[in-house]
Image (tube, coloured by chain):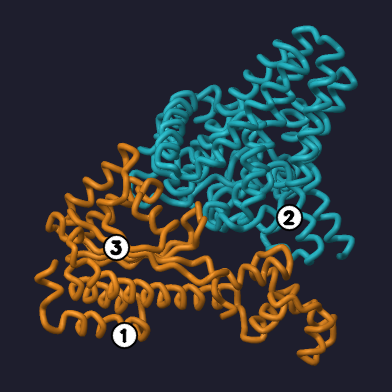
Chain colours: A cyan, B orange
Amino acid sequence: VTSREAAAASGFLTFLVPPTLLASGTLAGQAWLAFAAVFIVAPLLRAVIGEVSDKPRQWSEVTATVLEMLPVVYVLVLISTLAVTLVCIRRANLAAGALVSVGASMFAVFVLASCVAHELLHRKSVLMRALGGVLSGVIGYPLLETDHRNHHRLANRMRLAEAPYPTETVWQFSFRRGSAVIRRATEEHRAGIRSHRLWLAIAAMVGTAALFAVVAGVRAFVLYLIVAALSAWSLQAITYLQHWGLGTTDSSGSDLGWEDRCRLQQWLTLGISFHQAHHSAQRIPYYRLMVQRGSPRMPASYAVLFVACLFPPLHRTIMKPALARWTQQPQEAMPARRRVFCGRLALRRRRPGAPP
Amino acid sequence: LSAFVSQPGYAARALDVILRVARAPDQAAAVELLHEGAQALGAEQAVFASFVRDDDARESFRFLLACDPVWCFKYQEQGWFADDPWLWYAMTNSEPIAASAIPLRTQRQRDFQRLAAEFGCASFYIVPAPSSSGVSRLGVLGLGSSRQGFFESPSINAVKVLARGLAMELSQWCASQVRQELLVQCRISEDDLQLLRMEYAGLQTKDISKELGLSATSVNSRFQRLINRMAAPNRHAAARLAAEYGLLQ
């Protein structure tokens, strides 16, 4: 293992930061830390940290094995973090404002934890998939596996709510998709398809909710339920972001998805930002995924677009030029609007005399 | 069905097709043989699917289709593989069965069956092609007839034996095609396969290097390149993957 490789691999430890900040922030009375790190610091840092190379990275056997096990470490970290947070809530008897801060940070952590659950659910090992199911339950979205399995099978089919219609807002889409996911999960359960893991995930969610109630009282229980509901909704919103403008009406669907070369985002989301690559080869582990040539590129980070999509006209204003540019020149990776959000890169690329 | 299977030369015609499957040069020839095989067994339509067990992503699926293309189109459009009760039966059972004997638990499954009947499969016979232990690729042959109750006849045993033969041969053919694809895609040479066989047998690097007359460093670096090409985390996982795909047979 070379020091260069160790440094590159250690970047993936970044995804352990949000849960660690949740626990340490709550302990220090600064419960908002994890939320701020994910929604404010990370979008700013992407300009500093730069982008992932186009060349595939070759990992040594030792590094690849460590990276393969990292999501398991994450699950342990997250569970410990939640335990610490619970104890803090109980001891400090937090005021409503502080509870909202804890909730916001838990929300940020849960949304990113869904990326780890997703990675585990794609593993071949039954044990790893079970762990993914448990994690999806803990973060309040036990339907993640059903949702995601069908998302791959029916990718980008607008009619089946796997991609939004061109004029659909995130609010309309999340309602349509949420209903479709619940309907499919019910059907699959009745048909006896993979229902054991669904029950495991539901048990994990009920268990976590019960722990919140028993250890930290009714207020913490309600907080968990609200955060869980928001996380579940956010995952529908993220699907909206990933497939906006790329949906199809034909029978075969497509693997198209918005991608982002930002290295920090790759670390935090375990490669979900290479979404089209993931759709094309679902078994490729997160540390071997790389951006696909000619894929549509997000004009901003997930966090920025997530906030933007809450205001549909703003989201359309950001996305339409990026979609138009990609449609005209799919091989030209950099959408014009990206410059607004990725300053360092824009400065590096700007040549003297070129228009700003 | 009884009248059909008691025709002279019934078994010989089916056997002739079954024997030719292994020599099919490409997918078009395999589909032609599937069509001929289905006719020899009294069916009007046939579908063969080869897939890896527990492949939720459906990436491993390979289909040979000798049936109404509109039916396939509708199947794909509706994403019916998620609810297909016949496919689920084949994943967990090895005994051939008439589709009517499989309980339908959901509305979508009932819709699926109705669609099959609309496209000329009022009676359907499902023939799973299980794999040997350690190999995860399975197959399933589906034979369809527009005649109600055709495959529910007591004479079905005469079809069952031959249909199993056809299903197993098609499964072997598909597996060999997928093996070939994987070898090309991951650029796996015969030397690499030898390394993987040794690893799968539990040999240590020292033993492998002694066996192959190479240095331990050389063995390690060959494994290193191989696991990167196979997108596996380590040599053990690479050997397990190769075994599952039948590369080590």
Q: Position of residue A174 (x, y in %)?
A: 48, 28
From the viewer's perspective, is residue A347 above or below residue B72?
Answer: above
Q: Quadrant of residue B148?
A: bottom left
Same subunit, labels 1 and 2: the answer reads: no
Same subunit, labels 3 and 1: the answer reads: yes
Q: Type of residue at label 2? A: Glu
How many C-alpha atoms fall within 10 Å of the one at disc 1: few (<14), some, or many (≥20)? few
From the viewer's perspective, is residue B115 above or below residue B163?
Answer: above
Q: Which residue is mark 1?
A: B19
Q: Which mark is residue A68?
A: 2
Q: Which residue is mark 3?
A: B142
Please name whichever residue, B63 or B154, is drawn nearer the observer in this view of the structure: B154
Taking the image as shown, residue B57 lies to the left or right of residue A77, namely left
Q: Does residue A63 show up?
A: yes
Q: Position of residue A74 (x, y in %)?
A: 76, 42
Q: CA distance from mark 3 to mark 2?
A: 39 Å
* Circle 3 chain: B
Sequence-earlier tag: 3 or 1: 1
How many C-alpha atoms fall within 10 Å of the one at disc 3: few (<14), some, or many (≥20)? many
* Circle 2 chain: A
Residue shown at 59%/42% (left/top)?
A298
Taking the image as shown, residue B212 lies to the left or right of residue A279, namely right
Q: Secondary structure at mark 3?
A: strand
Q: CA distance from mark 3 to mark 1?
A: 19 Å
Q: Quadrant of the N terminus of chain A?
A: bottom right
